[in-house]
Amino acid sequence: MLQTFVGSPDALGRFGDYGGRYAPEILVAPLDSLDATYREVKDTPGFQAEIAELFRQYSGRPTPLFYARRLSDHLGGADIYLKREDLLHTGAHKINNCLGQALLARQMGKRRIIAETGAGQHGVATATVSALFGMDCVVYMGSEDMRRQALNVFRMRLLGAEVVGVDAGSCTLKEAISEAMRDWASSFETTHYMLGSALGPHPYPLIVRDFQRVIGVEAREQFLEASDGALPDLLIACVGGGSNAIGLFHRFLDDSVAMVGVEAGGHGTALGEHAARFSGGIPGVLQGTKSYILQDEDGQIALTHSVSAGLDYAAVGPEHAWLRDLGRVQYTSCSDGDALAAVNTLSRLEGIIPALESAHAVAEAIKRAPSATGQSFVLNLSGRGDKDIGILRENMPELG
C-alpha cells in the first residue's frame, strides 16, 4: 500500500524536513495575512466558482489530453499523451496560479502586483492578470534572461507592466526573486508578491501547488475516459522550481503511477554548468525555504546554466525534495543538446513546438518510450515554444 501523500504540508509549511518559512521579520505579517486569506476563502463556493469561471472563459480550461500518435509510432514503444498546457492563454501553465493569486490579492485589498520571472512566462501571466484586474504591475527579471527572452519582455510591457532588469550575480531567476522580495519588504501594505513557482516561504509552495493542481485533476479524468478506466503507467514533467510538475503529479500521488521529474542537465556535470539540484545539490535554505540547493564547499549559492531560462535556478520546490527523499518521484536530468533535439522531433512529428523547458520532459519520453511497449506515458507540455524562437535560431543555424 502506498503512503498517503495528499494533505501535506504541516501547519508550519513543512514537507517532511523541507519547506518552512525562512523570512525576515518584516515579511512575517504579510505572509501570515496571505496564509489566513487563502485558508479563509479557498474552499468557499464563491471563490471556487469565480476561479472556475476564469479558467473556462479566460484562460481556456480544460486543456486537451492529446495522444501523440506519430511520436508514439516513431519511437515504437509506449503510447505518449501530451497534457496541452501550452494551449492556455499566455502560452503556459503559469496563468493558473496567477489567476488564483490575483483573486487573493483583490481579497486582501492589494492594488499593486510584483513578480519575478525567468523564461518570462510567469511575468507575462502576471502582467496579463494585472491588466485584467486593473492592478499596477512590476516584474523583476535578470538581464541575461531579458536578453534571451526579449519577446516576452516586449509582451509584458505591451500589457502595461514595468519590467525591471537585475544585473547582479548570474543575472537570472535567483537574482530576480531577491529583488522582488526586497521590493515586497518595503511595500507590502499595498503590494502583493505573486511568486510564480512552488518555492519560497510558506504558504507559497502550498498555494502555487493548489492552483496548479488542476492540471493533474483534468489529466486523470481525461486519461480514465480515454482508456476505459485505466491509469497511465508514467507521468513526466520538467522541474525548475517545480510548479508544472507538482501540478501534474499531485492528484496521482496516492495512485500506483510512476512519476519522473526532469531537471536541467545543461552542458556539463561541473558546478555552474547545469541546474540539476538532485544530482549536484545538498539540503539548504534559499529565498525563504529549505530544499535541495546547488552550492559550493563554502555554502555559497552556485551559478547555474540551462538553455531554458525557466529551469535555470539553484533550488527546487520543497515538496519535490520531500517526494524525492521518500522515493515517490524519480528525478533525472536532460542536457541542453537533448532538449534541443526534442524540440526538433516533436515539431516535425506532431506540428507542436514546445517550450525549451517542456522539451526536457519530451526528451525523457523519447529516451524511455522505446523500451516501454504496452505502457502509457502522460507528459506535461507546460508551455509553447514561441518565446524560445530566438534561442532556437541561435542553436539551429542550419534552419536559417
Image (cartoon, rainbow, N blue to C red):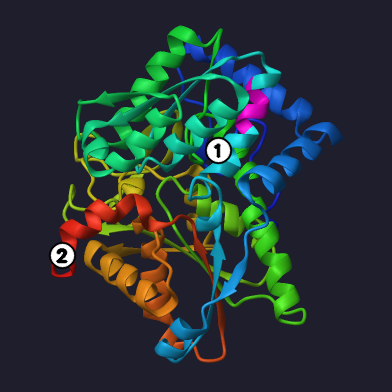
Which percent across, then down, holds residue 269? Answer: 19, 59
Which percent across, then down, holds residue 321? Answer: 47, 49
In magenta, the rendered stretch is 101-105
Observer-nearest residue: 270 or 173? 173
Q: Quadrant of residue 255?
A: bottom right
Q: Is residue 254 magenta?
A: no
247, above or below 119, in the image: below
The tag on residue 205 is 1
Q: Amino acid at mark 2?
A: Gly
Left of 266 or right of it: where is 94? Answer: right
Observer-nearest residue: 30 or 8? 30
* Residue located farthest toward the right when viewing the structure as drawn: 45
Q: Quick check: can you spot residue 267? A: no
Q: Quick check: can you spot residue 358? A: yes
Left of 53 or right of it: where is 323? Answer: left
Q: What residue is rendered at 58% in x and 58% in y?
A: 248
Left of 126 or right of it: where is 387? Answer: left
The tag on residue 400 is 2
Q: Quadrant of residue 332?
A: bottom left
Q: What residue is rendered at 33% in x and 63% in y?
A: 333
35, above or below 196, in the image: above
Q: What residue is rendered at 18% in x and 49% in y?
A: 271
Q: Earlier in the sequence, mark 2 or mark 1?
A: 1
The tag on residue 139 is none
